[in-house]
Image (tube, rainbow, N blue to C red):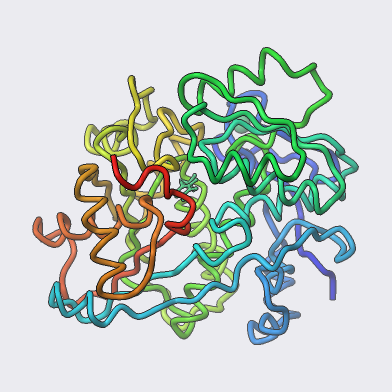
């Protein structure tokens, strides 16, 4: 049995195929992300889903991950995070079943570990040695960690007001750091104009195909942990949208593999802050792509992404899943963060807390019903945000 059933890469807009044996970025015709495709019929015929349980990290899903041989896997034990039932919070809102997947338990204390473990592993397999990334914070910390682990060089550009934990976790690895005025899009411009062409490989969200593959493992774990079905509703704090698109990709792959006991898709809801809600605005206006959000501002730094590169794929995912998008106030994020800690003992990242604030509104609007199974995605640990807690 092959370690991976990867077959090719495919443009998410025009469907053109690309070779995964070479370093790839985006489709040159569409300027759109490439998605990894697998030989799912052979996989379904050769490997039972129960076989996936024997490695204690997200690499238990190696057959649907892009790395071809185990020796290239760069791991710090990412994934395999708990799916917690929130009984006390559920009774506060009169909900039948409320869950939280706690990605704060990952290496580098955020789910960015999954994406960067996959991207750095594949880069190592392809012989790439130098990686660069513009980041709102957590992706930079994760790249720095995995690059060190792989013996590779990393250059990380982040806004100068990025949470201190992100700066320190990056600095201690010895990675090169540039603190840039503005937001993540300014950090991206900085690298584009300062990094020598062709010397540093760009692992920006969706500009290489493999971070998405790491993040999709959240979807595989959610389905497995709920007895091979998805909950009716998943709320996801959306910045660049990798997790959202990744969970939907997992759903589609699991459906094709025939591994789901119940084929009903989850409705995916993107949650953003009112200070930076480009996806919500585009969704509500019926647009097919996301426009740049001026003066983006939120203390949930992972949500401070004024224009996600994969806007079309994000909006398609929300519509295909029959979900939606909601923005929440900064104060309601802080209140939700306290509620989750007081009632459930989980110190979530503000991004994760935003999902509870969003749920409250969607319940009041009748968009989500109290008898549905609802899952909140907590994308990181609150401990990374100590300097932003009290504004
Ligand atoms: C990056 C990040 C997000 C946004 O994730 P995307 O998958 O890019 O939408 C949310 N929360 C935290 C803690 C993050 O670091
Ligand atoms: Zn294309």
In the figure, is residue 191 to the left or right of 346? right
* Position above or below: 251 against 36: below
Q: Farthest residue to the top: give it.
A: 193
In the figure, is residue 323 to the left or right of 39? left
Q: How many marks?
A: 0
The residue at the point 43 percent across, 48 percent down is 385
Question: Whole-percent x and y of residue 381?
Answer: 47, 59
* Position above or below: 232 against 114: below
Quarter holding the N terminus?
bottom right
Q: Quadrant of residue 193?
A: top right
The residue at the point 84 percent across, 39 percent down is 22
* Position above or below: 281 against 65: above
* Closest to the observer, 121 or 141: 141
Question: Whole-percent x and y of residue 268?
Answer: 35, 57
* Closest to the observer, 1 or 147: 147
In the figure, is residue 100 to the left or right of 45? left
The residue at the point 18 percent across, 64 percent down is 368
Quarter holding the C terminus?
top left
* Closest to the observer, 106 or 321: 106
* Position above or below: 283 against 105: above
Q: Quadrant of residue 265?
A: bottom left
The residue at the point 56 percent across, 59 percent down is 216
């Amino acid at each position: 049995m092959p370690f991976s059933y990867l077959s090719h890469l495919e443009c998410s807009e025009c469907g053109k195929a690309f070779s995964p044996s070479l370093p790839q970025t985006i489709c040159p015709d569409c300027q759109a992300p490439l998605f990894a495709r697998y030989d799912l019929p052979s996989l379904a015929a050769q490997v039972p889903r129960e076989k996936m349980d024997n490695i204690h990290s997200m690499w238990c899903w190696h057959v649907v991950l892009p790395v071809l041989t185990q020796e290239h896997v760069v791991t710090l034990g990412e994934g395999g995070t708990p799916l917690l039932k929130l009984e006390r919070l559920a009774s506060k809102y009169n909900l039948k079943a409320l869950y939280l997947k706690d990605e704060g338990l990952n290496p580098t204390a955020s789910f960015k570990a999954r994406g960067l473990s996959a991207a750095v592993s594949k880069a190592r397999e392809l012989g790439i040695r130098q990686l660069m990334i513009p980041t709102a914070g957590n992706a930079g910390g994760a790249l720095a960690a995995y690059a060190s682990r792989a013996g590779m060089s990393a250059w990380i550009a982040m806004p100068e007001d990025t949470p201190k934990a992100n700066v320190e976790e990056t600095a201690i690895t010895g990675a090169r750091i540039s603190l840039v005025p503005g937001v993540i899009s300014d950090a991206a411009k900085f690298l584009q104009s300062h990094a020598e062409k062709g010397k540093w490989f760009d692992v920006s969200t969706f500009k290489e195909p493999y971070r998405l593959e790491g993040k999709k493992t959240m979807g595989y774990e959610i389905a497995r942990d709920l007895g091979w079905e998805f909950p009716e509703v998943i709320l996801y704090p959306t910045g660049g949208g990798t997790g959202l698109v990744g969970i939907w990709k997992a759903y589609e792959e699991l459906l094709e593999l025939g591994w789901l006991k119940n084929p009903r898709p989850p409705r995916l809801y993107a949650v953003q802050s009112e200070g930076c809600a480009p996806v919500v605005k585009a969704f509500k206006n019926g647009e097919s792509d996301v426009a740049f959000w001026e003066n983006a501002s939120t203390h949930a730094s992972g949500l401070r992404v004024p224009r996600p590169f994969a806007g079309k794929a994000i909006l398609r995912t929300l519509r295909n899943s029959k979900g939606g998008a909601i923005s929440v106030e900064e104060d309601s994020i802080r209140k939700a963060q306290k509620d989750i800690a007081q009632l459930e003992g989980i110190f979530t990242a503000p991004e994760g807390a935003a999902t509870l604030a969003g749920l409250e509104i969607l319940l009041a609007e009748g968009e989500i019903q109290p008898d549905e199974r609802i899952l909140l995605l907590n994308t990181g640990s609150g401990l990374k945000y100590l300097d932003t807690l009290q504004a």
